[in-house]
Image (spheres, grey):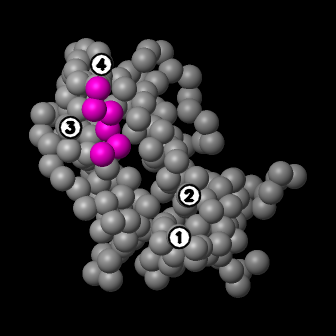
Amino acid sequence: MPGNVDPVSNEREGLLAYLAQQRYVLRLSAFGLTDEQARQAPTVSTLSIGGLIKHVAHTERYWMDLIAGQHHAMDYDALFTLGPDETLVGTLAFYDQVAAETTAAVDAIADLGRAVPVPKDVPWFPPDVEAWSVRWVLLHLIQETARHAGHADIVRETVDGGTAFPIMAAAEGWPASPFFEPWEPVGNQ
């Protein structure tokens, strides 16, 4: 996938394409990392690459459950940590599974304006809003994924100096250019 979304022909395609693009750039933050590196929280926060990907995957599934009329509580703190028994490969596979489920769920919804009830037990949800639309949920997922992709960029740069476009160049096999060299693991440069 290149650094930009391809042209889109309709709203549904656009929402899903932009969500897929943000998932992709978040996933790229993990390119070439070991499980140990994916668990590192090298800044003053507790954020790690593996924890961010795990959180975003579970958050996306949470929103798809809300669309399906299922509401459940989430342990947000636990979802920001890649546990010692979890692997980066397993977390990325789970994220792929959630992405496929999201696409299938959205494809099955005829009207993106369909109401999605707002849970009343979450303190950051507005008490005066009864429902969002499926469209709003998708826009929120794009926003949420982009926010955490930005966090992941900062964490990744702190872990090993890797930055977004050189990592994308390495992942996609781009040649060196006047803009940048593709990322290489430390020790191979």
Real-space Cα separation, disc 3 to disc 4, in angstroms: 19 Å
> How far across and how far down the image is residue 43, in percent?
59, 73
Residue 45 vs 8, above or below: the answer is: below
According to the image, label 1 marks what residue? Answer: 45
Residue at (35% x, 61% y) in the render = 54
Task: Name the residue type under label 2.
Answer: His
C-beta proximity under 8 Å, tags 3 and 4: no
According to the image, label 3 marks what residue? Answer: 119
Which corner quadrant of the image does residue 52 belong to? bottom left
According to the image, label 4 marks what residue? Answer: 112
Residue at (36% x, 58% y) in the render = 55
Real-space Cα separation, disc 3 to disc 1, in angstroms: 28 Å
Residue range in magenta is 123-128
Which badge, 4 or 2, comes first in the chain's sequence? 4
Residue 91 vs 101, above or below: the answer is: below
C-beta proximity under 8 Å, tags 3 and 2: no
Task: Name the residue type under label 1.
Answer: Ser
* 24 inside magenta stretch: no
Task: Name the residue type under label 4.
Answer: Leu
Residue at (52% x, 45% y) in the render = 146
